[in-house]
Structures are given as C-alpha cells and as structure tokens.
C-alpha cells in the first residue's frame, strides 16, 4: 500500500527527563536514525529541555515540538508559555488536548479551541489529541465523543495545518494498545468527519496518528492501516533504542 501522506512519529516525553538525560538521549538516538528520510520525527520534551534540544537537534532530521501552550501571545499569565516563545526555540509542533491535560488538569474543549486558534495563527502545527474513555467505548460512544472533541476543538479554526492523534484514553500508558482494526475504524471516521467539517481533499492530506502503548513490537501493525499515518509515542519514546526501532520499522534506512 502506497500512502500519499508522509509518516510522522512523535515522541511525547511528558514530565520526564532532566537536561542531562535529554543530552544522553540525543547522543544515543541521532546515530540510530541517520538516513531515515521517509519518516518525519518530532520530539516533544518538557519545556525545560527545549533550549538544549533546540541546539542539539539543529542539524538533524528530528523536529522539535512542545507539549502545551497558552493562547495569548504575551502578558500577565504566570507560569504560561506562548507560541512566540516556542517559535523562538525552533518548535514547529504543539500537542493540544492530550488526555492527561483533559482529565488531570481539567482542560476542556473551549480551552483547547483557544489554543488551536493561537497555534494556527502563529503558523505552527497542532497535534490535536482526541479519544474516548473505556466506559465511553463500552457504551458505544467512542465515535460521538471523538466527533464532539473535533467539532468543538476546531470551531472557528481556519482550515489549519493539522495533525490529529487518536488516543483512546484506556490505552495511554497502560500497556494495552488498541486493536489496529479499531484504530483504523476510528482514524477513518476522523478523516471522514474532517472532510465534513472542512473539505474532502484537505482531509485526505491530513496526518492522523494513533497513540496508546505503541512499542517497537506493534508499530508496524498500526502504520499498515490505511488511515493511520504514524504514532504519538509516550513511554516507549523515553528510551533512545526503543524509539529508534519504532521510527526505523517504517523506514528502509
Ligand atoms: C501519550 O502520552 O500520548 C501516549 C500515547 O503514551 P503511551 O505511549 O505511553 O501510551
């Protein structure tokens, strides 16, 4: 199967790694992915590692992303970080709506919508995370939950350069990945719904990732699905060797 969309593998380090640990990761990881050209690679470290990685990844094929952002460009918002600050450090991608921010921090679709507008206006690429909880799946509500997250999150956002990550909440950090066929069913649905919200041709070009306990052993089954264009990887991205294996499984290099 030849896909028109380039595979994207993004690392979400969450609240892991000091600057020294990030430096060791880069030293181990970069030699393992030399020559990988068929896959876009992004690392989203904690904010504190961004300046180091901005320099450390500069001449590499690995791009930099952030795990969060605030919607204003600047101002009296103690503890927040703006798109301008992230751009200054060379970030191209920003994760928005991750389930840990929705469920632990309490971010709702209104906040996520504001962030998406800010990212889009700044010309950066959001990685919008959507996904249902286990009770929602068991009650056959997965499609409706994800549909609402897309509808409300993207309300009034000009057809942006967008990445969507389908991340069933019950699969994140649990070691229990979704069945690849279920991931296809949901990513296919997301693409169909984006075509309704925006435009069919545009939706065909949007990359939709799967996330939730992706490992070197299962990545190939996910990217083999027609509507899965890569992965958002948490736990397995913390180890340079495992993350390189995940990237290389979809590469001839
Ligand atoms: C994530 O944090 O987005 C994620 C998918 O985590 P994990 O790979 O550990 O399930």
Image (tube, rainbow, N blue to C red):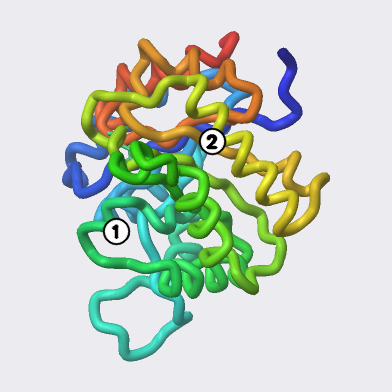
In this view, the residue in front, 202 or 47, is 202
Residue 190, label in figure: none
Label 1 sits on a secondary structure element that is: helix
Which structural element holds mark 2? helix
**Residue 197 picture location, percent across and down:** 70, 58
Residue 76, above or below 62: below
User: What residue would you read off at disc 1?
Assistant: 101
* Distance from the alpha carbon under mark 2 to that under mark 1: 21 Å
Side (left or right) of 90 relative to 1: left
Residue drawn at x 51%, y 45% is 143
Q: Nearer the viewer, residue 18 or 157?
A: 157
Residue 203 at x, y percent in the picture = 73, 46
- Observer-nearest of 247 and 233: 233
Q: Quadrant of residue 43?
A: top left
Q: Residue 32: in sight, yes or no? A: no
Task: Please report the residue visible at 74 percent of the width from the left and 49 percent of the height from the top.
Answer: 195
Q: Which mark is residue 186?
A: 2
Beta carbon at label 2 within 8 Å of ligand 1: no
Q: Mark 2 or mark 1, which has the lower sequence index?
A: 1
Does any portion of residue 190 appear in the rendered image? yes
Residue displayed at 37% across by 39% down: 137
* Figure quadrant of the N terminus: top right
Q: Is residue 26 above or below residue 112?
A: above
């Amino acid at each position: 199967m030849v896909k028109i969309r380039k595979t994207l593998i993004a690392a979400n380090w969450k609240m892991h790694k000091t600057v020294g640990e990030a430096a060791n990761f880069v030293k181990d990881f970069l030699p393992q992915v030399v020559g990988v050209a068929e896959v876009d690679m992004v690392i989203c470290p904690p904010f504190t590692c961004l300046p180091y990685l901005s320099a450390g990844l500069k001449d590499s094929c690995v791009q930099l992303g952030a795990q969060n952002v605030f919607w204003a460009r600047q101002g009296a918002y103690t503890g927040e970080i703006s798109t301008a600050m992230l751009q200054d450090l060379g970030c191209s991608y920003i994760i928005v709506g991750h389930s840990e921010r929705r469920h632990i921090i309490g971010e709702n679709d209104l906040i996520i919508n504001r962030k998406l507008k800010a990212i889009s206006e700044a010309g950066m690429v959001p990685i919008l995370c959507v996904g249902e909880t286990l009770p929602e799946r068991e009650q056959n509500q997965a499609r409706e939950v994800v549909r609402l997250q897309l509808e409300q999150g993207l309300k009034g956002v000009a057809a942006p350069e967008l990445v969507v990550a389908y991340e069933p909440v019950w699969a994140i950090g649990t070691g229990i990945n979704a069945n690849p066929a279920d991931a296809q069913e949901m990513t296919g649905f997301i693409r169909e719904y984006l075509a309704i919200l925006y435009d069919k041709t545009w939706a065909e070009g949007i990359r939709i990732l799967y996330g939730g306990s992706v490992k070197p052993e299962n990545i190939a089954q996910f990217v083999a699905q027609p509507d899965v264009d890569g992965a958002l990887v948490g736990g397995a991205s913390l180890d340079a060797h495992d993350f390189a294996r995940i990237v290389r499984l979809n590469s001839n290099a």
